[in-house]
Amino acid sequence: MDRRHLLGTGAALAAAGLPPLDGVAHAAPAASRSATPRPATARPEVPRAAGDALPSRAEITAVLREVADQWIDANPGPGDNQWANATFYSGLMALHTLTGDARYLDRSRSWAESHAYALNGGTTTRNADDQCAGQVYLDLYEAEGGSAKLTAIEACLHRMTYTDQVTKNDDWWWDDALHMGMPSFARLGALRGDTGYWTKLHSLYTHTKSAEGGPGLFVPATGLWYRDKNFLPGGILSPSGKPVVWSRGNGWVAAGHVKTLKALPAGRSDTAEYADTLKRLVTAVARVQRADGFWNVNLADPRHFPGPETSGTVFFAYGTAYAVASGLVDRATYLPVAARAWNGLVATAVHPDGALGYVQKVGDRPDSSQPVTYDSTADFGVGGFLLAGVELAALAS
């Protein structure tokens, strides 16, 4: 498959409902969640249009605490150290940073200690999913020190960078891997003052973006990403014959870029590339946001399992909020996009008891873990919600 074929798919995506897109319509303000209380098992009302005014920092923080505390109470055990649960703890550590609440730090530390700060798959793993826990270990190290916290993640990334098949760069064959793997390479390089980790990160990233499956998973014409090579041109289509551009897959990409940019110094060419790629993604998804603030599971086909979906939405809110805060995009244009997402989530997905619904569970495409319902939830969805809210709280007054 050549590059011309991929660029042709840019036109296919345009025909599927991505560009030409002329901005996001402003919606009527959503009713407050407290105005329409409902039990967690009740059938929800039709989602309302979401308002585009950002709540206060105190209001955002209160909802974040409610959602985090509900998940912790409902899941008293620490859970495994794989990517989904690690994403929850990444969000919990962000909430600790925002609030200074020692309960969140203690819970995260207890989880890490229950796994001896190890990686699923051991230090020889090259699987980015296995390395996701390292992000939380780095958070804990930055919060309270303790070099032993980094022994496993550093040994693992050092092997990939310096001793184990160092020219092999095809490990990140699916776009989720950018969130699971990129941040720890970026942060470890900054912590150790070792740019070799950044060079290896960019080599792995470049393969995913521009070579995986032939043309790479990134579509320059749209700014969006295919989940893996199975969805490239000539591969899997929606029932309507349109491309499959998975919302959460692109959400993982956004989150990976945010966390990486937070660690890298300005002025590097790869930093500029990551920033431009995030900007293009944020700009693209803004054009297909639903009136209720959510995004559909297939960004290229709104009829493909239509309805609110939380996990893609939280990561797009996270990426958009960071892009606004860092000046990558215009605040007046894009803060309302993130605010609509947040307001829609709070009005529609957050239950009265703090449970988070409409999360598409584990999968790799829009069809996975269907149906997505008011009661569908998952640890990584909660983690993404916490990350998004913390980023938005920094923009609020």
Image (cartoon, rainbow, N blue to C red):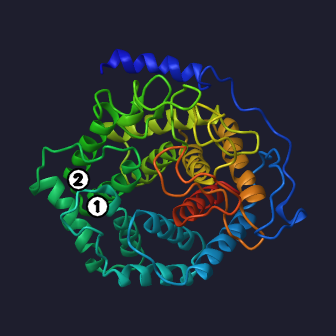
Q: Position of residue 154 (x, y in %)?
A: 23, 66
Q: Is residue 366 left or right of residue 196?
A: right
Give the secondary structure at mark 1: helix
Give the image quarter of residue 217.
top left
Quadrant holding the N terminus: top left
Q: Amino acid at mark 1?
A: Leu
Residue 99, relative to residue 389: is it above or below?
Answer: below
Mark 2 Cα-neighbour bin, 10 Å: few <14, some 14–19, many ≥20: many
Q: Earlier in the sequence, mark 2 or mark 1?
A: 1
What is the tally of numbered marks visible in this picture? Answer: 2
Residue sitting at 31 percent across and 42 percent down? 205
Quadrant holding the C terminus: bottom right
The residue identified by callout 1 is 188
Q: Is residue 192 left or right of residue 255?
A: left
Q: Which mark is residue 78?
A: none
Residue 55 visible to an observer of this rendering? no
Q: Amino acid at mark 2?
A: Tyr
Q: Which mark is residue 197?
A: 2
Find out whether the residues at labels 2 and 1 contact each other: C-beta distance under 8 Å: yes
Give the secondary structure at mark 2: helix
Q: Position of residue 156 (x, y in %)?
A: 21, 63
Residue 157, relative to residue 49: is it above or below?
Answer: below
Distance of mark 2 from mark 1, alpha carbons?
7 Å
Q: Nearer the viewer, residue 318 or 21?
A: 21
Q: Position of residue 29 (x, y in %)?
A: 85, 47
Residue 2, relative to residue 89: is it above or below?
Answer: above
Mark 1 Cα-neighbour bin, 10 Å: few <14, some 14–19, many ≥20: many
Give the image quarter of residue 153.
bottom left
Residue sitting at 62 percent across and 19 percent down? 20
